[in-house]
Image: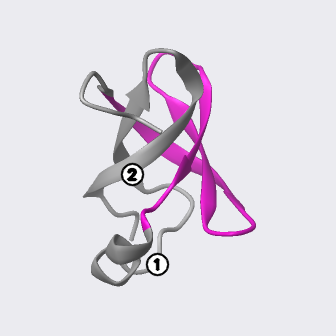
Amino acid sequence: MPGNDAIELAGVVIETLPAGRYRVQLTNGHRVVARVVMRQQVEFGPIAVGDQLLMAVSPSDMSQGVVRKILERKT
């Protein structure tokens, strides 16, 4: 779980996973599993493959992240 020292990274959703998680490919080619915090699920609405996200990632565990913002939706 990212804390105060979280790094913000942008990426594109490449796969939808069970339990409200998403596989996101970063601009440098790395893949991260991102999730949406429960209270923001209603605000964000459905997230689809191709959407661009801004995520917070902990420097100690770069394999997981929390979605902070949807930058661009694929139409």
Q: Is residue 28 above or below residue 58?
A: above
Q: Is residue 11 above or below residue 62?
A: below
**Residue at the spot x=40%, y=63% of the render?**
74
Q: Amino acid at mark 1?
A: Pro
Mark 1 secondary-structure assignment = loop
Residue position marked by numbered label 1 in the rendering: 46
Q: Earlier in the sequence, mark 2 or mark 1?
A: 1
Q: Nearer the viewer, residue 68 or 26?
A: 68
- Residue 15 is one of the magenta-drawn residues: yes
Q: Amino acid at mark 2?
A: Val
Q: Nearer the viewer, residue 37 or 54?
A: 37
**Quadrant in the picture for the C terminus:** bottom left
Q: Quadrant of residue 20?
A: bottom right
Q: Which mark is residue 18?
A: none
Residue 69: give x, y in percent of width and height: 26, 54
**Residue at the spot x=54%, y=21% of the render?**
62
Residue 54: give x, y in percent of width and height: 31, 43
- Residue 46 is one of the magenta-drawn residues: no
Q: Which mark is residue 67?
A: 2
Q: Principal SS element in the magenta part?
A: strand
Residue range highlighted in magenta: 8-37
Report crowding for label 1: few under 14, some 14 to 19, many 20 or more residues within 10 A (C-alpha). few
Residue 55: give x, y in percent of width and height: 37, 41
Q: Is residue 1 above or below residue 5?
A: below
Q: Is residue 65 above or below residue 73?
A: above
Mark 2 secondary-structure assignment = strand
